[in-house]
Amino acid sequence: MTVPDNFMSAEEARKAMEKDPNLTLVDQAQDPSISHGPPMSSIKDELVRADRMYGEALGYAHEFMDAVRQGQPFHFKDATPLVSGFIDSVFRNESAAAAISKLKSFDHYTYTHCINVSILAVILGKKLGYSRKKLQEIGMAGMFHDVGKAVIPDTILNKPGKLNKKEMNVMRTHPLRGFEILKAQQEIPDAVLRAALEHHERHDGSGYPRGLKGDEISDISRLLAVVDVYDALTSKRVYKDPLPPSKVLGMMYKWRVTEFSPNIVEEFIKSLGVYPVGSFVQLSNGNHGVVVDNDTTDPLRPTVKVVYDAAMRQLPVQEICLAASDLTITEVVNPDDHKIKVYRLI
Ligand SMILES: [Fe+2]
């Protein structure tokens, strides 16, 4: 996927969304037991739990990817309680679950990506109204979607530059390789197999490996395509810095018609908020802060913890709910440009 030079801003994305109010999704398996009420746990409390959960999942990701790399079978079912923990976390406070993957800097993208995609897929699946049983399948599919990358040579996987055509062709074998690896284990459900094979297929048929279109692609694969792109662009890689989440959401909004299922990007933006928790922003008075909550009626006016002034000098910490203030967000700032660890500010 190529990244356009001129990003659509989050503001532009929001305006475009307002002109396109027909956002109702069809074919949802609504589960009446699923609550869509206020979070059951504060973001601070949930971040502590999500942090522990993330650490455990990271250990498992190392285990199964390393086993595959050595041609060994892995313990597929060990992922079940981990994914169940992701779902519980998302239901307690989904902003915390979404933020955890973006708030800490990790070096090993191959491992963190499986976990991030699994968590984000559960968040989007919940927004789409899927049942808890289906969310478990979605989370498992997210965890194993990129297992084929374990057998791609490291020189290609972590090349600190653009891949040439030959290298790109090798990289593009990972969906089929992943499908074959999982199929050889026999106990893997069809939904997980299809997700490994189809997560790079695109709505307009421009994806790979088979150039499938629209609903020829499974519903879970279509969902994973969205969160996979989001996590790839917001993560640090050997060849690029992470992009701010709100910028990436704006870019994906631009691509939504060709790349993704109708309305799915809009639902993803609605579930994360225009400024996802953890976004580092500048306000209209020049001060800087971090978005700590976006559970307000106005997605453009989240709650911001103000920490620095316009010149990045430390201020007494103050939490401002923008929905009840005259201040607005004027810019999303990349915290890496100021060597700031956003995680420590929440
Ligand atoms: Fe992939």
Image (cartoon, grey):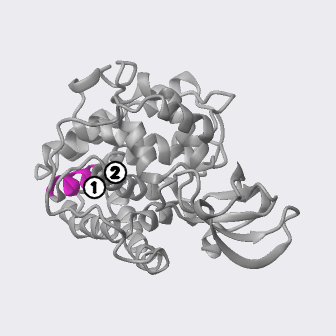
| Residue 271 x %, y % | 41, 51
- Does residue 140 belong to the magenta stretch? yes
For disc 2, the marked residue is 121
For disc 1, the marked residue is 139
| Residue 250 x %, y % | 56, 37
Going by the numbered disc 2, the residue's amino acid type is: Ala
At a point 67% along the width and 48% down the height, the residue shown is 241
Category of crowding for the residue at label 2, using alpha-carbon neighbours closer than 10 angstroms: few (below 14), some (14–19), many (at least 20) = many
Q: Is residue 77 left or right of residue 173?
A: left
Q: In the rendered structure, are the residues bearing label 2 and label 1 in contact, judged by CB atoms less than 8 Å apart?
A: yes
Residue 177 visible somewhere in the drawing: no
Height in image: 78 above or below 268? Answer: below
Q: Please give the count of numbered marks on the rendered protein.
A: 2
**Disc number placed over residue 2 in the picture, else none:** none
Q: Main secondary structure of the magenta part?
A: helix
Q: Quadrant of the C terminus?
A: bottom right
Q: Which residues are magenta?
A: 133-141
Going by the numbered disc 1, the residue's amino acid type is: Gly
